[in-house]
Image (spheres, rainbow, N blue to C red):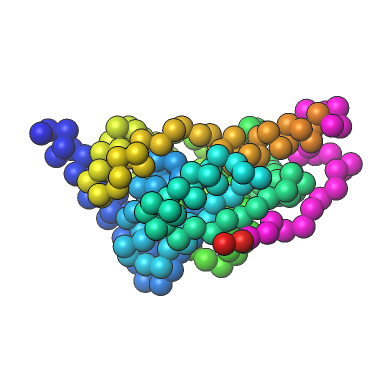
Amino acid sequence: MRDRRSNARFLARLESRIDAVVRGEPRAVLAFSAGLGSIVVAAIARKRLDLTCSVVGIGRAPDRVAADRCASFMDYPIRRIQLRPEEAVRIGREIVRRTPRLDAAEVWSLVPTAAVREQNPTALVLGGHGTARISRAVSESLTAYGVKTPLRASQTSTLPARSTLSACATLLGLPPAFGRPARRPAASGSGVADAVLRVAASQGIRTSDLLQSRHYHEGTRARADR
């Protein structure tokens, strides 16, 4: 009983934070991975405004497959952003330009969120970040891109346990399977990690070198489809 009350209190605080973020906004875009954090944020935010869940992937990336399941079983409004490997590299370089202190792994993890912002330059963009600790540099990058992360009350706040978020999913009435999704780091879930690894291997360089190399063709903007 104590755990249930604690989970309900956390959910109430999260709903209040999302209320504050979206107040006065008719619509928003969520950088959606179909991971636990973004599923819970989507379930709350879509009751408050017109929400589009934008999922980024290269090919049939795991995040895109999981997002399609959310669309089928929970009627989530999904917008699919298809990246090509060269677009992931270009976006990664732009992330570095904005926040030079990031390491390569952090850059690749931010590519999906940055791609959502690129497709929605003036929209309110939400993120489900907050189920894993992130560095101050990543936090600064999210701020630079204007992404609101209601799961993270502050940089130093205690992260919610996955069990707490799973309980929130249950309290929100989500199907049990969607309250316990597999963990997928952003770079691997979107297919970015594998794609840039193949690009780097084809050139005989490290993936971190792609962020400085001038010998790789920079692609055009990511394409979105529904």
Position of the N terminus, as image quadrant, is top left
User: Where is residue 76, by image quadrant?
Assistant: bottom left
Instruction: Give the residues drawn in magenta, as a range.
Output: 202-224
Q: Residue furthest front?
A: 72
Residue 13 spot, x, y in % from top left: 25, 49
Position of the C terminus, as image quadrant, is bottom right
Query: How many discs appear?
Result: 0
Q: What residue is drawn where x is 37% and y is 71%?
A: 24
Q: What residue is drawn where x is 65% and y is 53%?
A: 82
The foreground one among 149 and 79 is 79
The foreground one among 110 and 67 is 67
Q: Is residue 224 visible?
A: yes
208 to 140, vertically: above or below: above
10 to 16, vertically: above or below: above
Residue 48 spot, x, y in % from top left: 32, 65
The foreground one among 175 and 126 is 175
Q: Left of 84 or right of it: where is 6?
A: left
The foreground one among 213 and 37 is 37
Q: Is residue 13 visible?
A: no
Indicate whether residue 165 is drawn in magenta. no
User: Where is residue 36, by image quadrant?
Assistant: top left
Q: What residue is drawn where x is 56% and y is 67%?
A: 122
Q: Residue furthest left?
A: 1
